[in-house]
């Protein structure tokens, strides 16, 4: 029974927490209730068996345990018991659609404009997705104790200001959409980039982000929401081909395209067309729409050689107008290299690195190393690969770079 309970925790704990936050109106009480619920499960499920609906069982057990504790405490100190007890008979607990939407409600709560952008993302990754404070702090290059204090203060602000646990109305929904899209994409990237946790957790994170993207499109089919869902689906469609059975990294150009998920590619491409049609006339498409359009060109190409690099280069040029960041410029440089040759790409990459903004960005040095290798400038390529290796934390990427260095050494 212990493995079964562990599997339920992995699959359901964040959904249970989101519903408990809605019913109890307090992050800390909900987290306490979640712990009590699984403690009760460990005691009762081995004797009674796994319930038909583990999520509903856990929500009920956690909620009533905390409410009983609050009632006992109310004998000794004044408590706002009515606030926490109001949802004790909430009929939406039996409404699967309402319970499924709780995580979307929670994202909008965590992305409330009263919180800073960094805290919005950190709080959502912690509360909605269950990432550890340490993993989030590493992603933000922030000391874990500092980030933990920010999360604690954010939860207190939500509680004290009584920020509503709800999806905002039409008047404020669109203006808060950007933060929610950013958070969902960061959740997806946490799963896609494999920077923390085991393989199952990472796959669950990517699947969760796509599920949340679908919910958001149902709620608000705006172009950028459509574009984000398309982008995630198109990237995820290639997941089975990204690494070998031994875990070795496989570049896009070398992937077995028969392993790509054609149904997801078709869905993603259709969403791209829908998003571009829905974009405002006379205005440039948004960042997610353009990134999805680029991903669609890759995904629909029958082979690496058949990729339309002219189209991709043009799309990156438009994206640079919408999002003029060094990372987008780096991707544009890669497209230039594929269209015009490695010398043209290297010139663009060197210009970017000379500005200093990408000096600590491992992929910039990886691109430069590969272009130098293609040009036969092996000594310079070796230095660039070594710089990349020093900046890389993921084992699969480290192994790939070491293989490149070994190949250079072998001549």
Image (spheres, grey):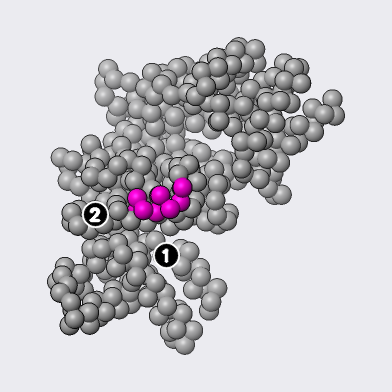
Percent across and percent down for residue 387 are: 66, 30
Q: Residue furthest bottom?
A: 47
Disc 2 and disc 1 in contact, CB within 8 angstroms: no
Please provide the residue range marked out in magenta.
143-151
Q: Residue at x 46, y 51 (%)?
A: 144
User: Element type at marker 2?
Assistant: helix
Percent across and percent down for residue 365 are: 62, 27
Percent across and percent down for residue 132 are: 46, 56
Q: Residue at x 24, y 54 (%)?
A: 158
- Residue nearest the viewer, comparing 400 with 229: 400
Q: Is residue 149 magenta?
A: yes
- Which dot marks residue 158? 2
Percent across and percent down for residue 323 are: 39, 24
Q: Residue at x 76, y 21 (%)?
A: 379
The residue at which mark 1 appears reads as: 12
Residue 124 visible (yes or no) = no
Q: Is residue 186 magenta?
A: no
User: Element type at marker 1?
Assistant: helix
Give how far apart the Cα atoms at labels 2 and 1 are: 24 Å
Q: Is residue 37 above or below residue 341?
A: below
């Amino acid at each position: 029974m212990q493995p079964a309970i562990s599997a339920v925790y992995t699959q359901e704990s964040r959904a249970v927490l989101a519903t408990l936050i809605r019913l109890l109106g307090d992050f800390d009480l909900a987290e306490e209730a979640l712990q009590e619920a699984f403690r009760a499960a460990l005691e009762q499920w081995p004797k009674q068996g796994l319930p038909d609906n583990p999520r509903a069982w856990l929500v009920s057990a956690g909620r009533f345990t905390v409410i009983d504790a609050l009632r006992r405490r109310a004998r000794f100190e004044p408590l706002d018991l009515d606030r926490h007890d109001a949802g004790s008979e909430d009929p939406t607990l039996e409404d699967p659609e309402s319970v499924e939407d709780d995580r979307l409600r929670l994202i909008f709560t965590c992305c409330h404009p009263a919180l800073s952008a960094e805290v919005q993302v950190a709080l959502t990754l912690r509360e909605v997705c269950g990432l550890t404070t340490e993993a989030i702090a590493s992603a933000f290059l922030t000391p874990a104790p500092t980030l933990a204090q920010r999360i604690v203060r954010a939860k207190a602000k939500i509680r004290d200001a009584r920020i509503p646990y709800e999806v905002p109305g039409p008047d404020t929904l669109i203006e808060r959409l950007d933060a929610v899209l950013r958070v969902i994409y960061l959740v997806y990237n946490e799963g896609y980039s494999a920077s923390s946790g085991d393989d199952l957790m990472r796959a669950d994170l990517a699947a969760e982000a796509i599920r949340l993207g679908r919910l958001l499109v149902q709620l608000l089919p705006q172009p950028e929401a459509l574009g984000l869902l398309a982008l995630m689906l198109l990237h995820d469609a290639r997941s089975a081909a990204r690494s070998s059975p031994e875990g070795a990294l496989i570049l896009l150009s070398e992937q077995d395209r028969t392993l790509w998920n054609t149904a997801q590619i078709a869905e993603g491409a259709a969403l791209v067309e829908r998003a571009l049609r829905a974009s405002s006339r006379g205005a440039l498409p948004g960042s997610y729409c353009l990134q999805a359009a680029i991903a669609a060109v890759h995904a629909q190409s029958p082979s690496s050689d058949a990729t339309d690099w002219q189209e991709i280069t043009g799309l990156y040029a438009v994206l640079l107008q919408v999002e003029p960041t060094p990372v987008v410029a780096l991707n544009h440089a890669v497209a230039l290299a594929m269209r015009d040759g490695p010398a043209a790409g290297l010139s663009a990459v060197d210009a970017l690195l000379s500005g200093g903004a990408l000096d600590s960005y491992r992929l910039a040095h990886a691109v430069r190393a590969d272009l130098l290798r293609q040009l036969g400038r092996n000594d310079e390529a070796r230095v660039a690969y070594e710089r990349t290796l020093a900046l890389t934390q993921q084992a699969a990427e480290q192994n790939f770079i070491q293989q490149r260095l070994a190949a250079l050494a072998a001549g």
